[in-house]
């Protein structure tokens, strides 16, 4: 590991030294790698890849000086069509492709809002003569260039007056130019980056709330993957292309893509949409905390949070695209890992730091990646893990016992409620791990354990009751068997007696009036 | 065989019984009821008697359950839950009531089959048979109305499905559904009328019919499965005393049933699912097992056929003694009747099994 | 009558005695078996949880000032009572996310689940924010004088 890591860091330090902010970056000591835990394939590529690449690879300092957004252009002027759109009439007749464009536009939200061909393409929509309708000298644009397109969309969408009646935001234009996409377009005139129409479509623009729109939350990962999972397309930028694969297996991806839970985060939830950019180390706690509010609050109370720049953040333990359901395995490596001082210490500056590359590997996202078995903190982690595992054990045991009692046909509603109280405490205890405070965790875990114990006691009482019923049942059945035996003895005696009578008087006609011998004597 | 009474020696065994005898003349009555003779070949398999015993159990446990049960949707579920968890032996009383209900239907059906295959419905017992069919019907209505009372999900949805079957009866279906449910849906109105039927109307009707049924059995005696009753004169053949011989056998059967009930109630106590929720249909909603055959038939054949077949079948069954003019009682001389019944029986069992596994 | 040919009077008498003893055992044991559960059932149990016509008492109005809430048991189920401008309302206290028990948060004036910070509107039980997929089910409240009752169902 160290074998590759050091030369890369040296390279990075060199690159950083060229920048005016060099001093600051050196002080941060590997601040660049802390800025993004994405596997560092990108780190080596800028030098080898195509020349115009700048500011894309996240490890190359993007902070230097963002290129400001160009001014918003004015909308394309054209004569009012007065409700008749001659463009559609003619173009529909040209060929199938043109007809399809007309149909797509007619179904779009723009058509409903009165945005017509000339608003984007220019020209005179009132004329049916090509020479007049499509006169470049009179402002006909034809197909706008990719670079032009952003301004063209912005000419309306950045205008609060125009957008007011649609209740739409107007900051997309400004935001776009701050995104990695926009910055690259501005800096390198790289028109291969995503522009408005790549995500929203052109003629067939739909509302973002329309489930068939490509920007509808459930469709966003596929949309981004359309470019970002394309190895050829991403080759010049030297960034990985497996994010979609990894994401779709994560808890987030499963919730969004498989369970269609629109509350689950898509790419845009963490990276932004118009302002798409990987979140930085300084931002990640806020980004995750947008949804994980309770967890964020707990984390901010922790010793970890106090470390500021050197702090382990959400992604140190949970990863980025590959966030999985957390479990107690996050505490320790099965075998002690290969400890390296530089993972957590800046040896020259004698400060703490966190080398995020080390945490790219899921197997190393463990407390003991930093906390050495000889340290005091290691013992504390052990105590935390122990408290949680005891509480979990008690909870599982209680659940098992309740299931057993329910299987016996006993009513366990009250035990279930006590168990859900235990579960509340257990989940709280698990979440409290983010505080890193043993006392807090142990107290909540102890609470969970106690409530689980109560639930188990209730279930045990029901089980005992059930066993008692079975024992009582055996006694009752035994009594009944005794009774049956007694009755059977009597019955046999009767039979024997009537056999004797039959012997006395063979062939007695059946309808003979009752034989005196049948009178139930002294019984 | 006419009912044979035996002369009774009215010597008072003890002063107390003598005192009672003087004031009731009960001994003659007991003698008239008990000291009859039955054909030696009669094999009742004790099914009818067991059904009677189970009815007794239902009256006893049902009365007890009524002490705690509250027939409103708000309180019904909780009162049952309370009975099961807080009242001592509540689980036992309710579970016995539950199992005895199922067994009662089973034994009434077995009794019917026994009577059918032994041709005991023929002269002079036609009326006994007709009333017996009525008793079967009432027993099933008992089961149907009682099933709703715990007001849990299973009860509620089985009733929804069950009443829907009634709703598909041609011509009167809609009215019948409205009448059964006391409204368009299964609501507190349904619970009220099912409770009223279950604890007031049905016990009275069943008790009355049962009295007539038993009186007829007593008056006509047991049928001989080997030879038909001759017309106009008493039957011939060897007889055995009803009391104590047959009564002892029956008592043994009752004890065995009691043991069975205790075992079933202890090992498989009556359950209680979540409280009824009209807004949430649980998966695999099914009616009780004795309606499963009809329910399954409705899925397989056109609705009109599925609903008319059981109604027609029940009608044919009722008038069977008047349709079947064959005086023979031995199965080999009643090929048509026995054959048809066997086919129907097998089909019914097959449908029910299919219903269970679907 | 003693028509038995083989045994003389003595064994017959002892057998009769055995039978009589058996009969006595049978009657007494059966009676005990049947009467015990019946009597046990009739004797009312000490707890009278279901004794108030389905309504469960849930404290006094005076103990629940406006804008406050608390979790109370309804039978074996937890219910959260909230005093709102529109009167006292109640919802199931079981979070629709993972089944934790919610609490009333005085600071925000909302129903909050401690597990994942799911927040519910105290008046309606609707999800305000967080992971719960569905609102808290409503529970009927009846206020009689100063007493609050919950109506299960």
Image: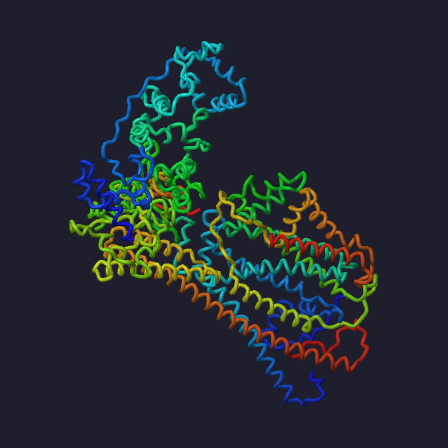
How far across and how far down the image is residue B143, in percent?
Answer: 59, 54
The residue nearer to you, when weighing B334 against B62, is B334
Residue appearing at x 64%, y 76% in the figure = A488
Q: Is residue A290 left or right of residue B170?
A: left
Q: Residue at x 73, y 52 (%)?
A: B318
Of B330 and A186, the residue lying toward us: A186
Q: Is residue C124 left or right of residue A108?
A: left
Q: Does residue B307 appear in the picture of this structure? A: yes
Q: Locate residue B213, reporting x and y percent.
A: 69, 58
Q: Closest to the observer: A183 or A513?
A: A183
* Residue B304 in the figure: left or right of residue A431: right
Closest to the observer, A193 or B264: A193
> Does residue A298 appear in the picture of this structure?
no
Colour scheme used in the picture? Answer: rainbow
Left or right of A165? Residue B358 is right
Q: Give residue B133's position: percent from left, percent from top.
A: 69, 54
Q: Is residue A340 above or below residue B49?
A: above
Residue A411 sits in quarter: bottom left
- Total marks drawn? 0
Task: Work out which quarter of the rendered image holds the N terminus of chain B and state it.
Answer: bottom right
Q: Where residue B271 sits: x, y (%)?
A: 50, 57
């Amino acid at each position: 590991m160290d074998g590759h890591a050091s030369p890369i860091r040296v390279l990075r330090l060199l690159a950083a030294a060229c920048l005016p902010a060099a001093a600051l970056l050196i002080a941060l000591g590997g601040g660049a790698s802390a800025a993004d835990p994405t596997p560092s394939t990108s780190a080596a590529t800028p030098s080898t890849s195509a020349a115009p690449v700048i500011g894309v690879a996240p490890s190359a300092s993007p902070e230097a000086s963002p290129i400001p957004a160009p001014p918003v252009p004015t909308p394309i002027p054209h004569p009012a069509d007065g409700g008749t759109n001659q463009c559609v009439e003619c173009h529909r007749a040209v060929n199938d492709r043109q007809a399809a464009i007309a149909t797509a536009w007619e179904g779009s939200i723009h058509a409903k809002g009165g945005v017509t061909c000339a608003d984007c393409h220019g020209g005179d929509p009132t004329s049916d003569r090509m020479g007049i309708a499509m006169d470049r000298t009179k402002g006909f644009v034809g197909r706008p260039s990719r670079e032009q397109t952003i301004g063209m969309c912005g000419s309306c969408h950045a205008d609060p007056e125009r957008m007011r009646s649609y209740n739409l935001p107007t900051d997309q234009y400004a935001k776009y130019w701050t995104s990695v996409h926009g910055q690259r377009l501005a800096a390198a005139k790289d028109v291969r980056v995503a522009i408005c129409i790549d995500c929203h479509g052109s003629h067939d623009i739909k509302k973002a709330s329309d489930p068939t729109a490509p920007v509808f939350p459930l469709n966003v990962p596929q949309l981004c993957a359309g470019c970002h999972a394309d190895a050829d397309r991403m080759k010049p930028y030297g960034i990985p292309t497996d994010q979609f694969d990894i994401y779709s297996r994560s808890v987030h991806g499963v919730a969004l893509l498989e369970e269609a839970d629109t509350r689950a985060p898509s790419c845009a939830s963490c990276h932004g949409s118009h302002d798409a950019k990987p979140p930085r180390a300084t931002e990640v706690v806020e980004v995750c905390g947008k949804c994980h509010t309770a967890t964020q609050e707990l984390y901010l109370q922790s010793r970890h949070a106090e470390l500021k720049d050197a702090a382990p953040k959400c992604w140190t333990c949970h990863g980025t695209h590959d966030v999985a359901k957390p479990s107690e395995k996050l505490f320790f490596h099965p075998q002690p890992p290969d400890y390296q001082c530089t993972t957590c210490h800046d040896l020259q500056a004698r400060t703490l730091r966190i080398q995020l590359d080390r945490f790219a590997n899921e197997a190393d996202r463990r407390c003991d990646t930093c906390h050495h078995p000889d340290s005091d903190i290691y013992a504390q982690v052990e105590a935390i893990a122990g408290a949680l595992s005891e509480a979990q054990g008690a909870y599982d045991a209680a659940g098992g016992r309740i299931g057993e009692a329910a299987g016996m046909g006993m009513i366990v509603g009250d035990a279930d409620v006590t168990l859900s109280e235990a579960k509340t405490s257990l989940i709280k205890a698990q979440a409290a791990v983010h505080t890193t405070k043993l006392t807090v965790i142990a107290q909540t875990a102890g609470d969970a354990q106690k409530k689980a114990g109560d639930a188990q006691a209730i279930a045990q009482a029901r089980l005992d009751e059930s066993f008692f019923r079975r024992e009582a049942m055996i006694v009752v059945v035994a009594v009944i068997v005794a009774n049956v035996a007694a009755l059977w003895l009597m019955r046999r005696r009767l039979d024997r007696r009537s056999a004797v009578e039959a012997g006395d008087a063979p062939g007695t006609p059946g309808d003979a009036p009752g034989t005196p011998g049948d009178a139930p004597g002294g019984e | 065989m006419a009912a044979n009474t035996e002369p009774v020696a009215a010597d008072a065994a003890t002063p107390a019984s003598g005192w009672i005898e003087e004031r009731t003349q009960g001994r003659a009555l007991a003698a008239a009821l008990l000291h009859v003779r039955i054909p030696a070949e009669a094999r009742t398999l004790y099914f009818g008697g067991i059904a009677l015993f189970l009815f007794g159990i239902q009256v006893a446990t049902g009365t007890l359950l009524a002490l705690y049960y509250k027939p409103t949707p708000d309180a019904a579920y909780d009162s049952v839950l309370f009975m099961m968890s807080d009242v001592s032996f509540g689980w036992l009383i309710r579970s016995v009531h539950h199992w005895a209900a199922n067994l009662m239907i089973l034994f009434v059906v077995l009794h019917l089959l026994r009577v059918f295959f032994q041709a005991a419905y023929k002269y002079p017992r036609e009326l006994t048979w007709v009333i017996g069919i009525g008793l079967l019907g009432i027993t099933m209505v008992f089961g149907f109305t009682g099933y709703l009372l715990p007001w849990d999900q299973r009860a509620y949805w089985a009733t929804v499905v069950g009443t829907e079957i009634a709703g598909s009866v041609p011509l009167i279906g809609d009215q019948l559904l409205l009448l059964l449910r006391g409204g368009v849906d299964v609501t507190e109105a349904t619970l009220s009328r099912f409770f009223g039927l279950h604890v007031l109307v049905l016990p009275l009707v069943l008790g009355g019919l049962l009295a007539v049924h038993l009186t007829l059995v007593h008056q006509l005696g047991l049928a001989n499965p080997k030879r038909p009753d001759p017309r106009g004169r008493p039957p011939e053949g060897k007889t055995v005393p009803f009391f104590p011989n047959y009564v002892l056998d029956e008592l043994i059967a009752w004890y065995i049933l009691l043991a069975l009930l205790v075992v079933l109630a202890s090992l498989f106590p009556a359950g209680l699912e979540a409280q009824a929720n009209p807004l949430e249909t649980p998966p695999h909603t099914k009616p009780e097992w004795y309606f499963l055959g009809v329910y399954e038939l409705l899925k397989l054949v056109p609705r009109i056929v599925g609903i008319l077949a059981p109604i027609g079948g029940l009608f044919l069954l009722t008038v069977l003694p008047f349709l079947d003019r064959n005086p023979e009682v031995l199965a080999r001389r009643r090929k048509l009747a026995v054959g048809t019944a066997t086919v129907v029986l097998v089909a019914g069992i097959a449908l029910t099994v299919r219903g269970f596994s679907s | 009558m003693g028509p038995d040919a083989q045994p003389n009077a003595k064994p017959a008498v002892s057998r009769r005695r055995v039978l009589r003893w058996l009969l006595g055992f049978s009657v007494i044991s059966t009676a005990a078996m049947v009467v015990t559960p019946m009597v046990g059932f009739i004797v009312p149990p000490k707890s009278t949880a279901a004794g108030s016509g389905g309504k469960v008492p849930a404290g006094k109005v005076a103990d629940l000032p406006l804008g406050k809430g608390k979790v109370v048991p309804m039978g074996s189920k937890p219910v959260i009572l909230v005093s709102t401008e529109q009167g006292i309302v109640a919802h199931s206290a079981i979070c629709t996310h993972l089944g934790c028990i919610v609490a009333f948060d005085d600071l925000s004036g909302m129903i909050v689940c401690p597990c994942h910070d799911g927040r519910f509107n105290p008046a309606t039980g609707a999800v305000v924010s967080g992971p719960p997929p569905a609102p808290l089910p409503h529970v009927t409240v009846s206020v009689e004088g100063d007493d609050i009752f919950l109506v299960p169902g």
